[in-house]
């Protein structure tokens, strides 16, 4: 608060002296006053605008400070504290070992995530029904016109509904990877450890079980859950899956009642669960109607079909997602409802309902031998009529949707270039399995035969790789000794000048800004533009005949040679699978190159499979790509200034263990772990282009876009034969 200023006596005397002198000049100053007054109105207007802007800034700042300080008062749907922001705050608290904050932020993020999903589903569901009942201008026109008019009406309804539900959050863009984190239950991954650090073992066990429900093979989480059970004062039966939906809870209650012989309660719980299941299935379908970046610009109908296919793939997964209650998918989950119901209805004396359940079970699975025998039994029962055996309409409608989606998806997969979720299952399947009915004296022979076949396959692969790379004239130019660390190498000769030129031009022509980094044109530094091309985008552009198929073939061929050489150089016993392939160019912004700081790196010092800390510790936790084992970079040009690759443990990049200058055909290969932190020095002039490759030994993480590109090329070649 402002008050009167008090001056010392000496200062006051000096001011009196100055004042007398100033009075002598007053007349001269008065002559200029009129000129100054002319400018006053303009200054006042500007000042007014500044004050308005300042007021708005202060109001926003106040809201943010209030939200930040009043974390306990935050509710789902907060205008500022959204689930993605809260998630990031939770990660920061986790890394800072602030366990109480970690718990609070992640709990709030989950609450807001559910609020957001519930409102999105509600808007889409409500508007879909309302638009279906609308009176149409196109009522007497073709089916197409009616479809598009309903789509327009549906869109308007959804926009208004979201505006009402989300307010200022309506247009907020959330990164796709953030949504994926919540789908994969990453918040619970952090929470289980934060709960443990606060000695909340029951909560930690619940969080761990929630993760295991979607990742049943998560070894660390299984170990943690066992520890929590051993140390905590609670039984395994008390541990909860915190993301289990209401239909699942009722299903479990029905199962318990059935096992206890309480058939009346079984009927009540199973009927309630079934109704909730239909509801959850519909919600899942609506939540699949998400945005889709096609990566190119096809015609209207093609664009519509592509987007629908994107949503259809998601919808095809709804039934098995909902069939996962205990960490594994139950193949017969839907039909199991009617198995429970037919027997329970029979036990409580409602034969008509039992017959209906049997017929419904057979509508779901006509080859169910148990239900076939059950029907034969009921047919012979006294008083049973033919009209008892009518399947439930909602179950029949559910199965028709399933059959339609499966048929259409099969048609798409056979008629267009696409890769389904099982594309890799029959490739390089080196898992050794023995059936339980194999005679014991033959098991060892069978096992040895499979191991021998695997060994022969590995030798054959190695010989082919040696022949391939030997013909290329590869030359190692830097080894671990010169590079100052283990698991490092640099070699030349992976691409000719012509090949480098083709790939460089392709990257510049086909690339989009920020590709691979959520369209952030400068993801690592504001002093450079970042452009990239993924194999998926390159494949789509070949399919659209925007680039030649030979260019895509060249990318796959050269990167395969790089992978083969990595396996042979590092003498790996297990194959490397591509996890991600990325053609990138980093271009200096001319206006930013003058006086650019040496610490403004083109790519900050980092590790490829863990989160590097200032302390030097590297946390192998999400969102790091923890499954990556080896990394490689193939350079395509050297017509630029700066941009050298460095191995360093200095986060600033000012000191380094080794430096590698890019040139056409040169590849750097190294292990992806904390032994190899690395970065890129500033690109000061021109464009630096390269192909980034990341590999894994875990074939579950094989690059889907590579399979898409390879499938596309195979089909094109088959057509050309």
Image (cartoon, helix red, strand yellow):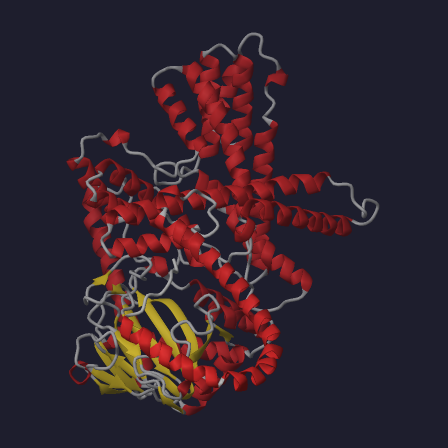
* 321 in relation to 562, above or below: above
Image quarter of residue 234: top left
Position in image of residue 476 (x %, y %)? 24, 86
Position in image of residue 463 (x %, y %)? 28, 75
Which of the pair 651/438 is nearer the observer?
651
Which of the pair 685/323 is nearer the observer?
685
Position in image of residue 508 (x %, y %)? 50, 82
Q: Residue furthest top?
A: 382
Relative placement, left or right, of 164 versus 108 is right
Image quarter where the N terminus lies is bottom left
Q: How many marks?
A: 0
Q: Residue at x 78, y 41 (%)?
A: 135
Position in image of residue 388 (x %, y %)? 60, 17
Q: Residue furthest right?
A: 140
Relative placement, left or right, of 97 versus 551 is left
Which of the pair 496/119 is nearer the observer?
119
* 235 in relation to 495, above or below: above
Q: Residue at x 18, y 34 (%)?
A: 232
Q: Residue at x 44, y 31 (%)?
A: 246
Image quarter where the C terminus lies is bottom right
**Can the viewer see residue 434?**
no
**Can the viewer see residue 425?**
yes
Which of the pair 202/53 is nearer the observer?
53
């Amino acid at each position: 608060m402002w008050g009167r200023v008090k001056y010392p006596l000496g200062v006051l005397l000096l001011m009196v002296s100055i004042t007398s002198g100033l009075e002598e000049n007053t007349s001269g100053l008065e002559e200029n006053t009129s000129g100054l007054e002319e400018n006053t109105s303009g200054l006042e207007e500007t000042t007014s605008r500044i004050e308005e802007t300042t007021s708005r800034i202060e109001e926003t700042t106040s809201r943010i400070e209030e939200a930040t300080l009043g974390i306990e008062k935050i509710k789902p749907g907060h205008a500022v504290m959204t689930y993605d922001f809260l998630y990031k705050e939770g990660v920061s608290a986790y890394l800072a070992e602030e366990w109480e904050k970690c718990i609070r932020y992640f709990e709030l993020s989950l609450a807001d995530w559910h609020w957001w999903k519930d409102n999105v589903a509600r808007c889409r569901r409500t508007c879909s029904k309302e638009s279906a009942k609308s009176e149409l201008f196109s009522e007497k026109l073709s089916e197409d016109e009616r479809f598009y008019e309903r789509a327009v009406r549906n869109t308007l309804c959804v926009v208004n509904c979201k505006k009402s539900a989300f307010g200022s959050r309506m247009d907020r863009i959330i990164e796709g990877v953030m949504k994926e984190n919540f789908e994969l239950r990453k918040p619970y991954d952090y929470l289980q450890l934060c709960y443990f650090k606060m000695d909340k073992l029951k909560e930690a066990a619940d969080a761990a079980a929630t993760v295991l429900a979607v990742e049943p093979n998560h070894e660390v989480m299984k170990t943690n859950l066992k520890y929590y059970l051993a140390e905590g004062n609670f039984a395994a039966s008390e541990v909860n899956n915190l993301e289990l939906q209401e239909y699942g809870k009722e299903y479990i209650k029905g199962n318990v009642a059935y096992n206890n012989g309480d058939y009346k309660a079984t009927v009540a719980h199973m009927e309630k669960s079934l109704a909730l299941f239909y509801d959850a299935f519909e919600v899942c379908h609506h939540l699949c109607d998400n945005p889709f970046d096609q990566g190119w610009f096809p015609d209207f109908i093609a664009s519509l079909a592509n987007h629908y296919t994107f949503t259809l793939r998601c919808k095809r997964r709804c039934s098995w997602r909902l069939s996962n209650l205990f960490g594994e998918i139950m193949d017969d989950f839907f039909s199991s409802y009617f198995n429970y119901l037919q027997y329970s209805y029979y036990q409580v004396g409602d034969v008509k309902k039992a017959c209906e359940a049997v017929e419904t079970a057979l509508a779901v699975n006509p080859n169910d031998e148990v239900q076939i025998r059950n029907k034969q039994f009921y047919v012979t029962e006294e008083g049973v009529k033919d009209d008892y055996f009518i399947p439930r309409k909602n179950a029949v409608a559910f199965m028709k949707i399933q059959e339609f989606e499966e048929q259409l998806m099969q048609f798409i997969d056979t008629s267009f270039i696409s890769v389904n979720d099982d594309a890799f299952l029959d490739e390089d399947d080196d898992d050794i399995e023995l059936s339980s009915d194999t005679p014991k004296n033959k098991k060892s022979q069978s096992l040895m035969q499979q191991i021998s076949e695997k060994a022969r396959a590995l030798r054959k692969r190695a010989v082919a790789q040696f022949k391939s790379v030997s013909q290329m004239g590869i030359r190692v130019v830097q080894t671990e000794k010169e590079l100052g660390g283990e698991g490092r190498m640099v070699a030349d000769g992976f691409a000719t000048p012509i090949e480098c030129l083709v790939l460089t031009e392709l990257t510049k022509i086909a690339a989009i800004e920020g590709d691979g980094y959520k369209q952030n044109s400068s993801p690592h530094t504001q002093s450079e533009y970042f452009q990239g091309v993924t194999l998926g985008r390159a494949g789509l552009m070949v399919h659209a005949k925007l680039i030649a198929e030979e260019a895509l073939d060249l990318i796959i061929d050269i990167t395969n040679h790089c992978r083969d050489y990595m396996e042979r150089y590092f003498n790996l016993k297990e194959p490397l699978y591509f996890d991600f392939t990325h053609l990138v160019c980093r271009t200096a912004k001319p206006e930013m190159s003058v006086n650019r700081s040496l610490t403004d790196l083109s790519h900050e010092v980092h590790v490829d499979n863990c989160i590097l800390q200032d302390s030097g510790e590297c946390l192998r936790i999400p969102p790091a790509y923890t499954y990556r084992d080896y990394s490689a970079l193939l350079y395509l040009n050297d017509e630029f200034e700066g941009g050298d690759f460095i191995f360093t443990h200095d986060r600033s990049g000012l000191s380094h263990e080794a430096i590698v200058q890019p040139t056409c055909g040169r590849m750097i290969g190294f292990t992806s772990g904390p032994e190899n932190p690395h970065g890129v020095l500033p690109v000061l002039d021109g464009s630096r282009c390269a192909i980034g490759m990341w590999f894994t030994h875990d074939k579950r993480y094989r690059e889907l876009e590579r399979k898409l590109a390879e499938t596309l090329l195979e089909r094109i070649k088959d057509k050309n034969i």
